[in-house]
């Protein structure tokens, strides 16, 4: 490291719609950020080449004060070990994209890759709520349910490089079928935004209660609407979140008896429901733990601002994966 | 380390009935072993003092060739972090027993403690099927169901020191009630020897098929008898193992999507059912994995001889915990 210069990393979050990128300092300050439309680029090389062009336009003004240590990339189905995006259904490119090698070559910088949920967890570890913690489980609750696991202060990638797919663990034997994988009763089928809508619609169909949901066209119902109706006093919508939290708590208890984390951090759009979701989750988590684990786990919200979380998560990999701190 | 001398450790396995102990070499050879009745000792100090007396009788003959590096203790509810046996229901002593401190003081040797299942996993790591592996889950299937988890070549103890209680994770929502914890639908309620008996009895009661179990007094039915009947062609007993394996496979798939292990090792008396249990387990494990994890996990038997496994597991802690190798 050059004496006196502070470290920065370049974070790239590749998404199905937008790819965001930015320069981030070791203490989580975003110096510069922007985004592009992923589908605008015919190949991943085109995307990375354009990001490099944008990078060299902004980097000079920071080089007096900072030195760049590397690149972190978060992408759907990003494999930490292979450095490839593997079979990502919502990206327009080849089935296997060696994105780490492409970026490392074009930028001439050490590069690390992982999937979105692991990037979120890495962001919590380097910049957020998991700072200074050794054992943490981060669960992302958005369109899908993902997870990133921290063991002994390090990200867990496992033998395949893609450990921590807790959204696909079965929590209800022969339960609700997942819309893409076909598996039955997995966590994502219930605790994603999509899952919450399905729960509310099922309740509306099986219940004799009237609900303000009945005045909304079915295609317009989403997790946020259900939250708003719940807060406005709609008991059916309250029950949908109650059931979601109860099931989530059961799953978290199972996870906690695996790694005995000091904290479980919930991240993503669904957590905007706040205590409406957190209360039943916390209650169910504690109830389903063996006594020895009770009151040992903090259930927390993400400490990263949601709009910046993707870039922070991606850039954090540079410190975590490349420098090991 | 003294030049030219090989390392040995003293392993102590404290059980509800017997406590076994012995001197073990780094390559897993037991030089000397014996056992005592645990309930014979009014206090844990009495037990350790007697073991020390026995130890100093045998150790001199080995000191020309070997040097002792420390003590490993496996005990029910042994907490790696605190060094205490905590709330062990089947031991006759105080609720909290600082056994690591007692042994370390009496023997004058560095001492490590963990619970039985973690000791089993540690044994596999140092001497057995997990040697040279980085990510492994060991599941012990005996009177109960326990587990020990290896992450990045190290035992996982988590923030509490007692990580890896996978026998108490829920696999059937509102399922069979556990006989001691009262929890419903946990893995141990189905996949322990006790659980297999309950499954067979439930099948016998709900099925119109005749079964050779009907000729055995209910109190005499155990997992081994059910195995023998299954092998002799009894379809109800075959179904009991089939159901056990199917449920175990589901649980193992959930665990595998947490840490992405290269192997899952099954250990303990129930595994004597061999392929009768392994076949449905393997099938169900693969079926319940996300495609990215399929065919990445070896499902294996323990490589430790069962009669020696407890001493090997306990003594292995000395290398693993005290020397970090």
Image (cartoon, coloured by chain):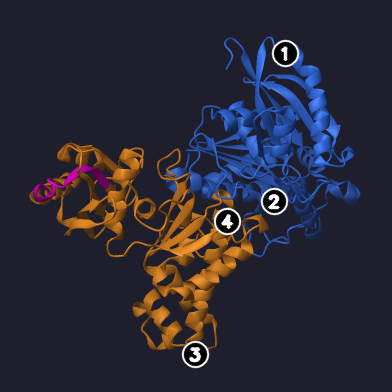
Chain colours: A blue, B orange
Residue B210 image label:
3
x and y percent of residue A127 in the render?
62, 25
Q: Marks 2 and 1, Cα distance to the nearest angstrom?
A: 42 Å
Q: What stretch is highlighted in magenta?
A: B59-72
N-terminal label among 4 and 3: 3
Q: Are marks 4 and 3 on the same chain?
A: yes
Mark 2 closeness class: few <14, some 14–19, many ≥20 residues within 10 Å: many
The nearer-to-camera label among 4 and 3 is 4
Residue B321 image label:
none
In this figure, which residue is indicated by the disc labeled 1?
A62
Instruction: Identify the chain of the residue marked 3, using the numbered disc in the image.
Output: B
Q: Are marks 4 and 3 in contact (CB under 8 Å)?
A: no
The nearer-to-camera label among 2 and 1 is 1
Instruction: Identify the chain of the residue marked 2, using the numbered disc in the image.
Output: A
Secondary structure, mark 1, is helix
In this figure, which residue is indicated by the disc labeled 2?
A188
x and y percent of residue A55 in the render?
78, 23
The nearer-to-camera label among 3 and 2 is 2
Q: Marks 1 and 4, Cα distance to the nearest angstrom?
A: 46 Å
In this figure, which residue is indicated by the disc labeled 4?
B254
Secondary structure, mark 2, is helix
N-terminal label among 2 and 1: 1
């Amino acid at each position: 490291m050059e004496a006196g210069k502070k470290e920065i990393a370049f974070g790239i979050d590749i998404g199905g719609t937008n790819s965001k990128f930015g320069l981030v300092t070791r203490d989580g300050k975003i110096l510069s950020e922007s985004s592009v439309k992923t589908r605008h680029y015919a190949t991943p090389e085109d995307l990375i080449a354009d990001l490099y062009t944008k990078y060299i336009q902004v980097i000079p003004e920071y080089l007096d004060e900072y030195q760049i240590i590397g690149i972190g990339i978060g992408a759907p189905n990003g494999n930490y070990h292979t450095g490839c995006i593997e079979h990502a259904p919502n990206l327009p490119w080849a089935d296997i994209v060696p994105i780490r090698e492409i970026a490392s070559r074009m930028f001439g910088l050490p590069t690390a890759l992982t999937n979105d949920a692991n990037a979120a967890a890495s962001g919590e570890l380097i910049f957020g709520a998991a700072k200074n913690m050794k054992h943490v489980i981060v669960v992302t609750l958005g369109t899908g349910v993902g997870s990133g696991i921290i063991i002994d202060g390090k990200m867990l990638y496992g033998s395949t490089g893609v450990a921590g797919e807790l959204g696909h663990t079965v929590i209800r034997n022969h339960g609700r079928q997942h819309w893409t994988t076909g598996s039955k009763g997995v966590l994502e089928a219930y605790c994603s935004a999509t899952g919450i809508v399905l729960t509310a619609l099922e309740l509306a169909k099986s219940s004799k209660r009237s609900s303000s949901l009945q005045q909304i066209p079915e295609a317009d119902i989403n997790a946020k609407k259900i939250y708003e109706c719940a807060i406005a006093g709609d008991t059916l919508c309250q029950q949908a979140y109650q059931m979601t939290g109860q099931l989530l708590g059961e799953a978290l208890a199972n996870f906690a008896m695996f790694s005995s984390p000091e904290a479980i951090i919930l991240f993503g759009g669904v957590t905007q429901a706040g205590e409406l979701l957190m209360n039943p989750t916390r209650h169910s988590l504690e109830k389903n733990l063996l006594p020895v684990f009770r009151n040992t786990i903090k259930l927390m919200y993400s400490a990263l601002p949601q709009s910046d979380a993707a870039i922070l998560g991606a850039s954090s990999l540079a410190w975590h994966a490349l420098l090991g701190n």
